[in-house]
């Protein structure tokens, strides 16, 4: 069994004082090495995504805008706080390309599963709109590579980043070949990006293939576990994906400075173990985690480590930060609504 990792720390894509900065995964390889797991992984050399690969998921003007802003010295790419430096065009292509390289390895049988440790993140990047610290949509580019080059028919993308994956939703909104499930805090006008209502279900042929799980704060480990067993699993069994992609953001950790979803490292680890076993059941073990957010570096690092334990079949969990001190919110009512919405009985 081979687990691949690919690392794009993008040190030159950086802005002082910005949460999405170069310190996030700069030290992750020595950290994994100290934990003794790096030797169990096959580290891949990242390649640049080609413009052809990017055009499968983005409009040419979006690609051109990132290239041009970088080429003219960098600056803001949106009306929020999504920045580019002179190196960002190349580094964002590298993040997307690395994710594509990892999926290529899995789909040609050179690896069973893997984790793309990349930045800048991607899940807020829409077909023709840049937002939320994201330049190119890495997970979407990997999904289209799987379909275009490897003939994969059905792909399930699960996004457990604490923010709604509006970019990924947008790219596959009309598409019944990619099921997109996103769990996220949903507090309209108060929490970014404000989309991801359960009424957003997809369009045309894609109707029913977008599933949003909008959460109140402090749902915590038990609630997230129930979402997987009571919602994700039955939907996945119906859909029968051939590949599982995970937009893995660790900002749902209770200590993350950007959010308050209440997950612990143990909760994240149980999710990773569950998803790996779901892949064993449905996709012949083919699962790729793709890094999105996560802004408390210790929670992020241990979250990644525990995910690698799950990917390599070890049931070890390291959780030096413990559980959220507040009580967890009960989501029975929400699950009831969602099951009715998506015809799960
Ligand atoms: Zn996020």
Image (cartoon, rainbow, N blue to C red):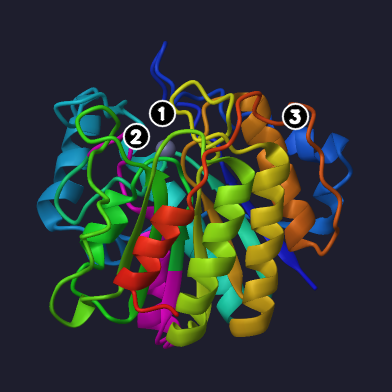
Mark closest to the chain's N terminus, 2 or 1: 1
Q: How many marks?
A: 3
Residue at the spot of label 3: 322
Reading the image, the residue beneath label 2 is 88
Please identify the quarter of the rendering in which residue 53 is found.
bottom left
How far apart in space, not on screen, are marks 3 and 1 (Cα)? Answer: 32 Å
Q: From the image, which quarter does the N terminus lie in?
A: bottom right
- Residue at the spot of label 1: 13
- Residue 93 appears at what percent x and percent y? 37, 49
Q: Is residue 263 above or below residue 202?
A: above
Which comes before the other along the chain, label 3 or label 1? Answer: 1
Front residue (pair 45, 21): 21
Q: Position of residue 238 (x, y in %)?
A: 45, 86
**Residue at the image point whose x is 44% and y is 41% from the top:** 162
Query: Looking at the image, which residue is at 44% across and 60% down?
Result: 335
Q: CA distance from mark 2 to mark 1?
A: 5 Å
Is residue 146 inside the magenta stretch? yes
Going from the N terminus, do you reach mark 3 or mark 2 first?
2
Identify the secondary structure beneath mark 2.
Answer: helix
From the viewer's perspective, is 239 left or right of 60? right
Between marks 3 and 1 in the image, the one whose residue lies nearer the viewer? 3
Q: Does dot 3 land on a helix, a strand or a loop?
A: loop
Q: Is residue 88 above or below residue 284?
A: above
Q: Which picture quadrant has residue 88?
A: top left
Magenta segment includes 20: no
């Amino acid at each position: 069994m081979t687990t691949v990792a690919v690392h794009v720390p993008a040190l030159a894509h950086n802005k002082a004082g910005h949460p999405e900065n170069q310190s996030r995964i700069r030290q992750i390889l020595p950290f994994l090495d100290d934990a003794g797991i790096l030797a169990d992984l096959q580290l891949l050399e990242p390649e640049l995504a080609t413009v052809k690969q990017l055009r499968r998921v983005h409009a040419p003007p979006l690609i051109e805008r990132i290239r041009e802003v970088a080429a003219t010295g960098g600056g803001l790419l949106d009306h929020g706080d999504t920045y580019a430096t002179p190196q960002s065009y190349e580094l964002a292509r590298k993040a997307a390309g690395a994710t594509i390289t990892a999926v290529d390895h899995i789909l040609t049988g050179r690896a069973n599963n893997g984790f793309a440790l990349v930045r800048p993140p991607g899940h807020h990047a829409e077909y023709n709109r840049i937002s939320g610290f994201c330049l190119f949509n890495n997970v979407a580019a990997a999904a289209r590579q799987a379909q275009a080059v490897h003939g994969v028919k059905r792909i399930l993308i699960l996004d457990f980043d604490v923010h709604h994956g509006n970019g990924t939703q947008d790219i596959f909104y009309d598409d019944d070949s990619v099921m997109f499930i996103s769990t996220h805090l949903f507090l309209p006008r108060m929490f970014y990006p404000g989309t991801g209502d359960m009424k957003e279900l997809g369009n045309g042929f894609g109707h029913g293939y977008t599933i949003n799980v909008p959460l109140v704060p402090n749902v915590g480990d038990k609630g997230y576990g129930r979402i997987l067993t009571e919602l994700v699993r039955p939907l996945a069994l119906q859909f029968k994906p051939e590949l599982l992609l995970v937009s893995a953001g660790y900002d749902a950790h209770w200590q993350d400075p950007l959010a308050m979803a209440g997950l612990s490292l143990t909760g994240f680890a149980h999710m990773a173990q569950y998803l790996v076993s779901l892949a064993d059941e449905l996709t012949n073990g083919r699962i790729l985690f793709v890094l999105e957010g996560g802004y408390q570096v210790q929670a992020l690092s241990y979250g990644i480590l525990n995910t690698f334990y799950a990917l390599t079949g070890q049931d070890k969990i390291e959780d030096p930060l413990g559980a959220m001190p507040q009580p967890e919110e009960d989501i029975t009512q929400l699950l009831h609504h969602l099951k009715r919405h998506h015809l799960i009985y």
